[in-house]
Image (cartoon, rainbow, N blue to C red):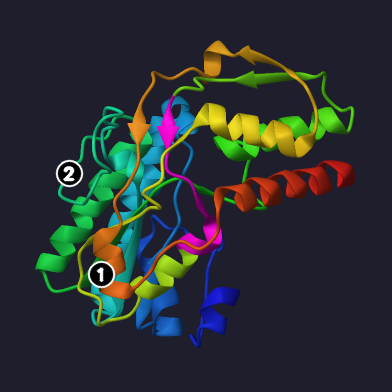
């Protein structure tokens, strides 16, 4: 909200006070605010939780998106609608492959990814009916305040707890050989803001750095930042097959001029320091 206001938007938002699956409730909010742009971020966003609760994931992510699109068509049909999707909509590729661009077929594997891909298909159908829909496919992003269900934040929290003596010096990890494309949440927000410009053609857009980083490299850098020497143990519950998911954001860059500005080292330092602060205050 602050970033929208800083960019000159008259920004309004809703959280749990509006049921994202209730067309009438969403429509009422749209009637009150009369938006010329809508950013749809409401979702269950954890892949791991989506495996545990696929029904809830479908309800929130698919039914929620369908309800929002129906309300937009009824109440503010001229508004630009930005649907927030995920790199998980793609199938991970081999390490020798080029970064993934938007022409790559969607092959979602988890309940989370399938609901995000299906939500994008709903958006495309609404676009054919005349709604101005833009779809963002954001690659991994993190920063201060993120939940520890995501890998960078989880590692940072474990190390902060180890440094503070709140956890034995053992890091529990999943597969460290997988490769990801990491961004700072602030850079991703800047991409969202750029996509709200009605001059940007409606299409799917990757939000990615194009830089490949193994999970092992993330862990090594965070351990160096923390200055501790934990024992690293594989946790079977965290284990996933080795894969590679790195994006090509050329389309976004050409349409808006966007490019990421925050390096991985700063992302990791910020996330670690944030968890130190949170754990001290707990």
Residue 21 image offset from top left, x and y in percent: 39, 55
Residue 271 image offset from top left, x and y in percent: 67, 47
Stretch of the chain drawn in magenta: 178-188
Residue closer to the observer: 25 or 45: 45
Which residue is at a point 59% across and 38% down the rendered structure image? 152
Q: Which quarter of the image is occupied by the N terminus?
A: bottom right
The secondary element bearing badge 2 is classed as loop
Residue 255 image offset from top left, x and y in percent: 26, 72
Say whether disc 2 or disc 1 marks the residue closer to the N-terminus: 2
From this viewpoint, is residue 239 visible? yes
Which residue is at a point 32% across and 50% down the rendered structure image? 63
Q: Is residue 90 left or right of residue 274?
A: left
- Disc 1 residue crowd, few under 14, some 14–19, many 20+, Cα 10 Å: few
Residue closer to the observer: 161 or 70: 161
Residue closer to the observer: 60 or 249: 249
- Disc 2 residue crowd, few under 14, some 14–19, many 20+, Cα 10 Å: few
Q: Residue furthest left?
A: 128
Task: Identify the image quadrant of residue 24.
Answer: bottom left
The secondary element bearing badge 1 is classed as helix
Which residue is at a point 29% across and 76% down the rendered structure image? 80
Q: Which quarter of the image is occupied by the C terminus?
A: top right
From this viewpoint, is residue 70 visible? no
User: Is 183 inside the magenta-drawn segment?
Assistant: yes
User: Is 74 inside the magenta-drawn segment?
Assistant: no
In the picture of the structure, the residue carrying the numbered disc 1 is 254
**Camera-side mark, 2 or 1:** 1
Is 216 placed above or below 4 here?
above
In the picture of the structure, the residue carrying the numbered disc 2 is 104
Q: In this view, does 158 lie to the left or right of 251?
A: right
């Amino acid at each position: 909200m602050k970033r929208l206001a800083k960019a000159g938007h008259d920004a309004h938002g809703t959280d749990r006070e509006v049921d994202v699956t209730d067309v009438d409730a969403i429509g009422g909010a749209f009637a009150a605010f009369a938006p010329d742009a809508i950013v749809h971020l409401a979702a269950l966003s954890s892949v791991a939780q989506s495996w545990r609760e696929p029904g809830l994931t479908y309800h929130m992510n698919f039914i929620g998106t369908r309800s929002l699109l129906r309300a937009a068509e009824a109440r503010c049909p001229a508004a630009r609608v930005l649907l927030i999707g995920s790199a998980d909509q793609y199938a991970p590729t081999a390490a020798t492959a080029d970064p993934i661009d938007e022409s790559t077929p969607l092959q979602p594997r988890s309940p989370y990814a399938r609901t995000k891909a299906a939500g994008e298909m709903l958006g495309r159908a609404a676009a054919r009916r005349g709604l101005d829909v833009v779809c963002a496919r954001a690659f991994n992003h993190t920063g201060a305040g993120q939940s520890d269900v995501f890998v960078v934040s989880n590692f940072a929290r474990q190390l902060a707890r180890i440094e503070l003596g709140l956890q034995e010096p053992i890091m529990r990890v999943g597969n460290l050989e997988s490769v990801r494309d990491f961004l700072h949440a602030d850079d991703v927000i800047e991409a969202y803001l750029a996509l709200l410009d009605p001059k940007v053609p409606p299409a799917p857009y990757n939000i990615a750095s194009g830089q490949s980083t193994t999970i092992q490299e993330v862990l090594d850098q965070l351990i160096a930042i923390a200055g501790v020497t934990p024992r690293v143990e594989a946790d079977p519950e965290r284990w996933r097959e080795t894969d590679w998911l790195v994006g090509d954001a050329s389309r976004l860059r050409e349409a808006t001029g966007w490019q990421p500005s925050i390096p991985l080292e700063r992302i990791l330092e910020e996330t670690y320091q944030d968890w130190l602060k949170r754990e001290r205050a707990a």
